[in-house]
Amino acid sequence: MNARDTFVISSSRPILITGAAGFIGFHLCHRLLAEGRQVVGLDSMNEYYDVSLKRARLEQLRKYSNFRFEHVDLIDRDCISALFASAAPEIVVNLAAQAGVRYSLTNPHAYAESNLNGFLNILEGCRQASVGHLLYASSSSIYGGSTRMPFSVHDSADHPLSLYAASKKANELMAHTYSHLFALPTTGLRFFTVYGPWGRPDMALFIFTKAILAGQPIDVFNHGNMQRDFTYVDDIVEGIVRLMRRPAAADPDWTSTAPDPATSNAPYRIHNIGGNTPVQLTRLIEVLEDALGRKANRNLMPIQPGDVPATFADVSSLEEATGFRPKVPIDIGIPRFVEWYRDFYRV
């Protein structure tokens, strides 16, 4: 599918976004609502991180008359089924999940419940409601032990290093099954280290900013020898919005003798959405120090279980499908985050 193969999103049927009070979900809802789209936002408001931040995001979204919020957990099968029946969404963007690599080491069952059972409920809802396109969050974490850079969607990703990553890989396999059996167009989105205003408090940039402003040391894992393909949240949203209009279609060139993991003879696609520019962790800290006007006290630590030393996204499939590639560098994105952080927390 190329950038010209698009379809018009109906104004009469809403777009359902799960994880609407989350970081990416909030930004996507805000973008679509500002464009006049009818949006139904779903969130469980769980306490994985500060719920007051989620409530503050929701307050921003509730200002729009074309926004409807549903306080529902993905694992509540009956409520999810009823919601799909009543809302009849044309497009679903599933961003709700139990996030976090390190949290999965101590709370594994949360990932099975939300990321597996919850995602199955979404797939069933899409099938029953004849949804036109399901997009869902996967993760760069699924590349796991691979050292072949940049990470390409056309390469296998079968050696995850955390249960979180395994659950995201499972989502891709589950989605393919529904694409094959029920001709449900599904698009998996492998996000790479998303950051920006209204970000998640469990992410490194947020943690570093809070600690530096408080005069506390920061833990720098792998002695700073980590590389991440940091991706500004507006670039993530732009990629999602463009892909929403391009539902997955069967690949006429797909063959079972040499199967492409990113496509299929079913309406199924996988795309990376990443900055396409890996950044050394020490460089991120330097840019953050400049934005804050303060130096960090660095506590060098070994790499943690489940972490990978480097990520680097090949975004050629995204660019081919949409004509877009992420473009906001950390020199611009980090100061924007710091400006939001100082304003929101009155620092």
Image (cartoon, grey):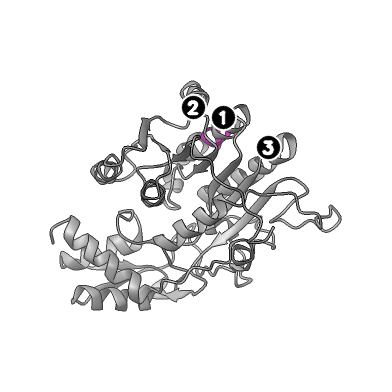
Question: Which residue is nearer to you in this view: 101 or 223?
Answer: 101
Check disc 2 and report the residue beneath it: 80
Percent from the top left, x then y, of residue 217?
Answer: 23, 68
**Circles 2 and 1: CB distance less than 8 Å?**
yes
Q: Of the residues shown, which amino acid type is indicated by label 3?
A: Tyr
Question: Which residue is nearer to you in this view: 203 or 327?
Answer: 327
Check disc 3 and report the residue beneath it: 178
Q: CA distance from mark 2 to mark 1?
A: 7 Å
Percent from the top left, x then y, of residue 189?
Answer: 55, 54
Find the magenta span and give its range. 116-120
Which residue is rendered at x = 24% and y = 74% of the image?
Answer: 291
**How dense is the environment of label 3, judged by Cα within 10 Å: few (below 14), some, or many (20 and up)?**
many
- Label 2 vs 1, first from the N-terminus: 2
Check disc 1 and report the residue beneath it: 125
Indicate the quadrant containing the N terminus: top left, top right, bottom left or bottom right: bottom right
Q: Quadrant of residue 334?
A: bottom left
Percent from the top left, x then y, of residue 124?
Answer: 60, 30
Q: Of the residues shown, which amino acid type is indicated by label 2?
A: Ile
Badge 2 element: helix
**How dense is the environment of label 2, judged by Cα within 10 Å: few (below 14), some, or many (20 and up)?**
many
